[in-house]
Amino acid sequence: MSSVNETLIRDVVSEVLSRLGGAATAPAPAAPAPSSNCGCSTRKVNRADVALRGKFGVFQDANEACAAAQEAFLQLREKGVAARRKIEEIVKALAEKNAEAWGKLEYDETKIGRLDHKIAKLGLIKLVPGVDWLRPDARSGDHGITLEEYTPFGVVGCITPSTHSIPTLSGNIVNIASAGNAMVFNAHPSAAKCAAAAVRAYNEAIYRETGIENIACIIEKPTLDSFNALCKNEFTRLLLVTGGPMVVKAAMQTGKRAICAGPGNPPVFVDDTCCPTRAAKAIISGGAFDNNLLCIGEKEVFVLENTADKLMQKLSENGAVKLNEAQLERLTKAAFTFKEGQGGGCAHASVNRDFIGKDCSVLAQAAGINLPSGTQLLFAETDAKHPFVDEEQMMPFIPIVRVKSVEEGIEESLKAEHGYKHTAIIHSHDVETITAMARALDTTLFVKNGASPCGLGLGGEGYLSFSIATPTGEGITNPRTFTRVRRCVMVDNLRIY
């Protein structure tokens, strides 16, 4: 059985399609009175200066957005945990209710991935953890009692990708607001319109239900300048970056604490103790999901020689299509651009953006092949140095590399992963092999005998987030990620036994 569970994805799509509806558009009540400072050291802003410049969280200027978010943080702080829980409920309900409309909006703007999977990702926001994750820790002893609580930072500056624009910001709102923070988004420019539409709908509903304005702000037309302004603003206390290596590097150089979800190039290792049918189904369902846009998705497969033919047979039997050598060469020339290395060295390959997230039919046309209807994934044999192995290519294509031993398979997997410490997958029933690969790759996600999305609770156990902080080490983000731990100590009292 396929471990991602295409059944799960189909069920989500069916469920959200059965609950069609648009974002709430009821008129908002009159603006609430400004919240009192209550002696808080966190600086307030003049709400009159920002109220007329943003419309339900959508701003033209980053500094104005940050000021509005600061005021929203103070409002949320005053209204307490009940308001956090209400925001969590609103975001999850609206994401599911508007999954089809928003999925189509994002697909039409970005023109990458698969529409059915865009819809499914929004239906899965209900799996993102919220307020209930923030249980305090208490200890008592002979010298009194100590309480540690998870408390908010204030305003979180967020960078979101084009690959999962609305799902990422939706999950971020649940996590960050559940922790008591407000936030400002600087979306990827190629997915900014859909992100702004979702933010506007979320804020409208949150204001109507709680009276809190601008809990999640966004720059309508994001630029490098707006990114820099967001990072430098005095109200921005924390950064959350979900994107490529360049924006991660920029965020980490700002001098502010940054939680960074960076790139990945997840390898798969298949040995001769696994179930080839189960492995093949998992590789297809994970590698084909949203046309392989997921950073956790299967990008290359290393397989023992004595199992390779059987695995490829099972891939073909379960709907994947194999390219021959000539077809692979044509696709490679179309999908990559090559530049000579410095000093006359080897050519360096860069992914052709026109192929990222495109359907198999687009890749097949470049390869010169006609596909059977419904084909989700292409594959071909390559060597370990092929561009499709070395680059995070984000296309519904998987290179298959034969290896002679477990040791070679693990070594090549480690090379292909490039030390990102993001995700790795193994199909094996040998616990020593599984353990050896887990220790060698040391990745944030390590999936055994399943498809990559199982690492996010989709067919496996666990919880969901579309921001997986690998370079900075926080892992799969949750509400605790966006909190400070504060300790309160009562000496020699309050212990009741």
Image (cartoon, rainbow, N blue to C red):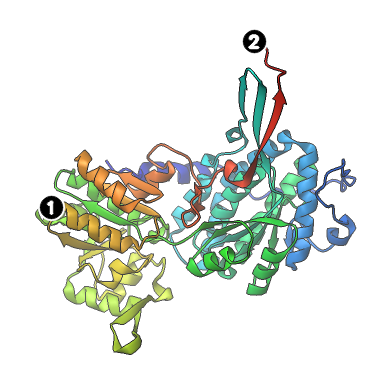
Name the side, left or right, on which 102 lies relative to 368.
Answer: right
The part of the image, by quadrant, that contains residue 287 is: bottom left
Q: Does residue 275 lie above or below 308 as drawn?
A: above
The amino acid sitting under disc 1 is Thr
Q: Nearer the viewer, residue 108 or 238?
A: 238
The quadrant in which the C terminus is found is top right
Residue depicted at 72% across the width and 18% down the height: 493
The part of the image, by quadrant, that contains residue 365 is: bottom left
Q: Which mark is residue 307?
A: 1
Q: Position of residue 356 (x, y in %)?
A: 41, 69
Q: Which residue is mark 2?
A: 497
**Pointer 1 with pointer 2, Cβ within 8 A:** no
Q: Nearer the viewer, residue 349 or 331?
A: 349
Residue depicted at 41% across the width and 49% down the height: 444
Task: Answer with mark 1 or mark 2, whichever residue precedes in sequence.
Answer: 1
Q: Position of residue 191 (x, y in %)?
A: 57, 65
